[in-house]
Image: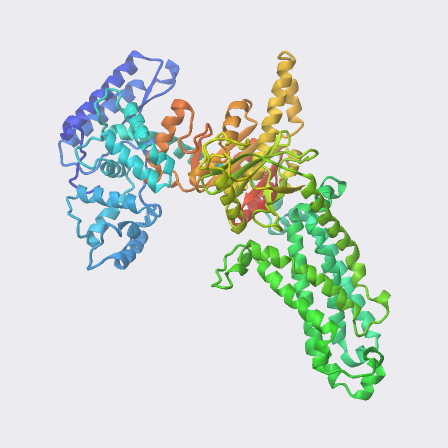
Amino acid sequence: MASGQGLRPGNGDPAEAHSRRILLESSIVLEELQRPGEATHHAGGSFARLGPRATSATPSLPSRIIKRLASGLQREESAKKPWKRMERTATTAERGLRSLRFLQMVSEGKEGEEWKAVEKRFYQCAANGRLSRENFGRCIGMDDSKDFAAQLFDALARRRNISAAEGITKDELRQFWEEMAEQNFDSRLQIFFDMCDKNGDGKLSEEEVREVIDLSASTNKLAKLKGNAATYASLIMEELDPDHHGYIEMWQLEMLLQGMVESEGNAKLTKHSEMLAKSMIRERYRNPVTKFLGLASDFVQENWKRIWVILLWLSLNAILIAWKIFQYRRRAAFQIMGYCVCVAKAAAETLKLNMALILFPVCRNSITWLRSTILNSIIPFDDNINFHKVLAVAIAIGSTVHTAAHVTCDFPRLINCPPQRFMRYLGPSFNYKQPTYPELLASIPGVTGVLMVCFMAFSFTLATHSFRRNVIKLSWPFHHLAGFNAFWYAHHLLVLVYILLVLHSIFLFLTKEWYKKTTWMYLAIPLFIYGTEKLIRAFRERQFHVSIIKAAIYPGNVLSLQMSKPPGFKYKSGMYIFIKCPDVSPFEWHPFSITSAPGDDYLSVHIRTSGDWTTALKKLFSKVCEAPNTTKGLARLETTIIAEGELIRSREVPRLFIDGPYGSPAQNYKKYDILLLIGLGIGATPFISILKDLLNDIKTKEAIHESQGGCEMADISSGRSRGMGRAYFYWVTREQGSFEWFKGVMNDVAEIDHDNVIEMHNYLSSVYEEGDARSALIRRVQSLQHARNGVDIVSGSKIRTHFARPNWRKVFVQIAANHKTSKIGVFYCGNPTLTRTLRKLCQEFSHSTTTRFHFHKENF
């Protein structure tokens, strides 16, 4: 705070305001003397009643009273002098409230470095040496909070009596920046108060409180909270102005923000826990050699399934390469083409093997069945798509080597070979006619080989992440080559590749005997299994008839569908199904996680709009969700929705076909003692089914307990201990409306789970982290509202929402401390960016604690 600027108490007289506060403190002190069994605590100028204590526990009560009175008199004397800074004893509350900050990047001791960055941006944003109000946010690092930065600009200008209509100079910016970066909480609180107190009378009216809540809601992208700003302003006034004066003062605002003290204490405790976890390193990790051996041992223990499968696959390829090289060294072709023909044939042999193996990872019905067998304990079926990609890379390498060896080495040697030598060794293979280069390319093996390479290159390119996720933006008319649809249709070109591969092998130049043309032997069984899978899908399409029961379109472009469960359709929580809508495309099937529990009498999915197909599907259901009256039973879901699930008479509900269910890593959640479920955005869907399943188990156990007349609850508890013990669910989303998707599940957890089997943590990442001035008032309003009626203002459910992103290390520290020697299943579904962090934390805490974290992931 700038020198010479004082506080603005309610009546405009600093001394009078301090006197009133001293009288209040004195009344508290007298109350302490009258209540020897209780003690009060003054935290930074606000008052909080502590719990009852024994008289013997407060021997220093008189000394504390004297200190408090002396502190009040000292402030009274300082009020008579020109005010510079509110000096106050550094209590726990004050240290906690220092987290009310305006600048994210400024830390004590680095102000000079940060100012250089601000100064650099000043020269970029200023015009004629003056920084405008509109560019102030960008200059100080609040580019994403321009409205909040503009209000901050106005408050700082009013405090210094600056007319900033034409902007501020660099020196004035430096003064503004020093005030915002001030480490003293009192200065920051005064700035925040001035932002709220726009008329400068030292009092906050209900309208001013509403405006700052509205501003904070807009800054944090909380549209629903913004619409209820007047209600929450009234709540704050009711809480802080019980005498209905119609205003609140700064010391009351400080009291409102005092709840941030708890978070400061928790942060210190977390930091201490993290340091303790890092220091408690096992003996075998202290020495570099034993550390390397220990980490290697842990790596093998964690990945032994993947290791042996990859080693087996590499060994098979190596054996085939060695066999083909040895075989062709003894053939006549070696006398003309040398090792070129050996390399080409070795690569071709690996191509046959890998073209056969690549079909197995996408035989989903077979893999789902094998998950329930003993093979699941030795084969990593969860990595089927990763292995599919590895095989694709091997096929690309094999195709390149095979083609290059033929085109650049074998063909030139054939056409340049002396005729006598050619006829001696290879005459019978080419009908005693030495071919030319064009004739070799125009032959059946040449044409089929070129077409295979072209089709595979096209299909593999569109299957890469950049094309499949539409990261690459192509101009017209090639824009349809990027996206999921392009990947889907291009992959079906591989059917032609298999046909061409068989033709290619039938008309080989150097092999005439049918039993030596082994391509069909490699492909027969895989193609049979893959064809059977397609027939099963076609059968299910006719067998599994579903009708739409309920439909809703939620904020965030999410379509929720509840369908009738087909007879005989059985699944486990965490599984997924494929859905086809002929009204959108007669051929396309798309996978979606099942969000209903196995015990539910319906089947539900939540579909987020992220491509052409899902967009078209949402539009179809948007039309049938427009009418207000139900005509054919399509009812709306029990939650807030954008479009109601009612059926328009003139249109029919879109037809849907399902295929599945198919297995996923999350379906094996019951084999773990503890669950840590982490979902990003729509990635929460596979875990909602698990939560519903757990809730159904809780209901069943309670029903059994009631039917037995309240007998031995211990029996139920012991039954639970034999299975899954506790589930932690962390859901991180960027949009407030996302909580509407599963609000019913959150309320069920709060109402039914009395034994705290499920612990839910919802995080809204669009809100600024704890301690930021842009979200401070939102947090306190949230606390007040939740304490009053148990409903969270952000999610609208009974589960309280956290802001910003979780501290994942803190999460693992707490779970490892709470569940020592336990086997914890960590299941993650979401963007791949977090996969590496979570996997690393699982490995680290499995090494450094007695808790074992087993990581499983699904990426979308």
Foreground residue among 805 and 70: 805
Foreground residue among 641 and 222: 641
Residue, x 48% and y 60% (percent of image)?
473
| The quarter of the displayed image where residue 242 is located | top left
> At which x and y percent is residue 406?
71, 75
* Whether residue 278 can be seen here: no
| The quarter of the displayed image where residue 266 is located | top left
Foreground residue among 811 and 281: 811
The color scheme shown is rainbow
| The quarter of the displayed image where residue 42 is located | top left
> At which x and y percent is residue 546?
63, 37
Foreground residue among 555 and 315: 555
Does 536 sit left or right of 333 as displayed?
left
For the N terminus, which image quadrant?
top left
Q: From the viewer's perspective, is residue 9 above or below residue 559?
A: above
Does 402 sit left or right of 551 as displayed?
right
* Whether residue 639 can be seen here: yes
> At which x and y percent is residue 765?
43, 41
How many numbered marks are there?
Answer: 0
Does 280 sit left or right of 499 as displayed?
left
Q: From the viewer's perspective, is residue 88 above or below residue 325?
A: above
